[in-house]
Image: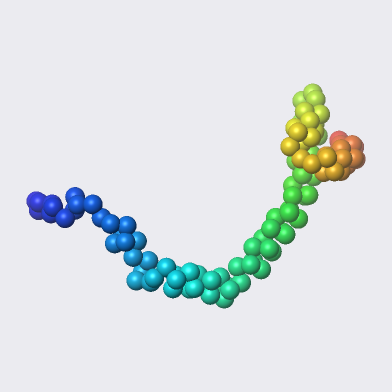
């Protein structure tokens, strides 16, 4: 069994630990900016946030419709109270206005 060298236990300086692939800090920053532009990360992040926000409305409809089908008492009311505590007032008004419609539609199914 080979013995360990004393070099393994000596402290390593930060400069030798982070060689950055042989690049200087300025070169690394410039390469990062250039690659971000070439991969269009600004546009992709905007697209991701846009489509994520678009997906929230059907998700809320699905959750409200699922909760309306549960055979438990006051589940939808407690769900609406939880939404009121966590979301802005205009969103709460929109959900409160659409929840009776959803409850009526999905309770007849």
Residue displayed at 74% across by 47% down: 59
Q: Nearer the viewer, residue 68 or 50?
A: 50
67 vs 62: above or below: above
Q: Nearer the viewer, residue 80 or 61?
A: 80
85 to the left or right of 39: right
Residue displayed at 74% across by 37% down: 86
Q: Nearer the viewer, residue 107 or 84?
A: 84
Work out whether residue 79 can be spotted.
no
78 to the left or right of 98: left
Q: Nearer the viewer, residue 67 or 109?
A: 67
27 vs 66: above or below: below
Residue displayed at 36% across by 69% down: 21
* Horizontal and vertical percent position of residue 44: 64, 66
82 vs 12: above or below: above
* Horizontal and vertical percent position of residue 1: 9, 51
Q: How is the image coloured?
A: rainbow
Residue 61 figure quarter: top right
Work out whether residue 63 can be spotted.
yes
85 vs 18: above or below: above
Residue displayed at 42% across by 68% down: 25
* Horizontal and vertical percent position of residue 64: 79, 39
The C terminus sits in image quarter: top right
* Horizontal and vertical percent position of residue 11: 23, 52
Residue 37 figure quarter: bottom right
19 to the left or right of 84: left
């Amino acid at each position: 069994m080979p013995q360990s060298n004393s070099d393994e236990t000596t402290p390593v300086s930060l400069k030798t630990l982070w060689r950055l692939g042989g690049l200087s800090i300025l070169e690394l920053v410039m390469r990062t900016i250039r690659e971000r532009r070439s991969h269009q990360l600004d546009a992709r992040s905007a697209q991701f946030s846009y489509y994520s926000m678009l997906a929230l409305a059907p998700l809320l409809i699905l959750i409200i419709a699922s909760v309306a089908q549960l055979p438990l008492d006051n589940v939808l009311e407690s769900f609406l109270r939880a939404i009121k505590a966590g979301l802005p007032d205009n969103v709460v008004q929109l959900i409160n206005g659409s929840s009776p419609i959803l409850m009526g539609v999905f309770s007849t199914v």
